[in-house]
Amino acid sequence: MAAVLACGDGAVLSHMSAAALWGLLRPSDGLVDVSTLARSGRARRQGIRLHRCTTPTSGAVTERLRIPVTTPARTIEDLTDCAPPHLVRRATRQAEMAKYRLGPGIKGDRTRSDLERDFLRLCRRHVIPAPEVNVKLGRWTVDFLWRPQRVAVETDFYDYHRGRVAFQDDHARDLDLRRRGFAVHRFSEDQINERPADVAADLRDALGLAS
């Protein structure tokens, strides 16, 4: 709020700082991103990264915790010009999961992690039909699903799937899905990134695709 106020009327939190305020990216140390109209005569201030907009931000500005800030859609649009692609993807995923309204130009793939995105890339590279992504089956959300073939895939990060609770949840999910008639395949981060051909071969067998 102090950074926005320091930049005068019409200033709003934006870019990486707005993404952090919306919970789309983790907060980072350093400069605070603030946007103003290009005609603003405000000088740069210590601790603030000033962005001068060439078009009005009306309609793309709201408040969060009483701080003027760009909307999630405008925030992601701004990130495409200043952030690495993987951070833009992460912010888009978080916005979709939070059910924030996004513009028609912002395309997500429903993935919730870079590993899930890597798996989709593996499918495209090995000409495997695109699955449904993060869909509900009963009380479970399945990472990937080929519904006609009744094949489900879970992609596992070690950090997210270790421990007794995660172990029990994974096995309860697999048992329930098998009882519903779905074959469940689990692939680790190392398998997807280091042995993609083996993963693809297993998938092709499961889906009844020609080798």
Image (spheres, helix red, strand yellow):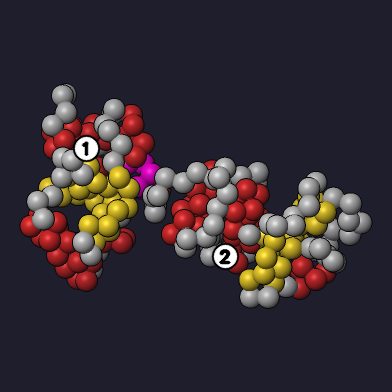
The answer to the question of whether label 1 and label 2 lie on touching residues, with beta carbons closer than 8 A, is no
Mark sitting earlier along the chain (1/2): 2
What residue type is disc 2 on? Trp
What residue type is disc 1 on? Val
Residue 54 appears in view: yes
Nearest to viewer (mark 1 / mark 2): 2
Q: Locate the N terminus and report the quarter of the image it occupies.
A: bottom right
Q: Nearer the viewer, residue 16 or 55?
A: 55
Q: Position of 29 compared to 153: left or right?
A: right
Instruction: Give above or below for 208 relative to 49.
Output: above
Tag 1 residue: 199
Disc 1 from disc 2: Cα separation: 36 Å
Secondary structure of residue under mark 2:
helix
Residue 114: horizontal and vertical position, in percent? 40, 48
Q: Nearer the viewer, residue 99 or 25?
A: 99
Disc number placed over residue 22 in the picture, else none = 2
Q: Nearer the viewer, residue 122 or 139?
A: 139
Disc number placed over residue 37 in the picture, else none = none
Q: Nearer the viewer, residue 148 or 201?
A: 148
Secondary structure of residue under mark 1:
helix
Residue at the spot 16% in from the left edge and 24% down from the top edge: 211
Q: How many marks?
A: 2
Could you say which quadrant of the image residue 208 lies in?
top left
Instruction: Give above or below for 6 relative to 137.
Output: below
Is 65 magenta? The answer is no
Q: Which residues are magenta?
A: 115-119
Q: Position of 207 compared to 72: left or right?
A: left
Disc 2: CA contacts within 10 A as few (<14), some (14-19) or many (>=20): many
**What type of secondary structure mainly makes up the magenta span?**
helix
Q: Position of 200 compared to 94: left or right?
A: left
Residue at the spot 12% in from the left edge and 47% down from the top edge: 183
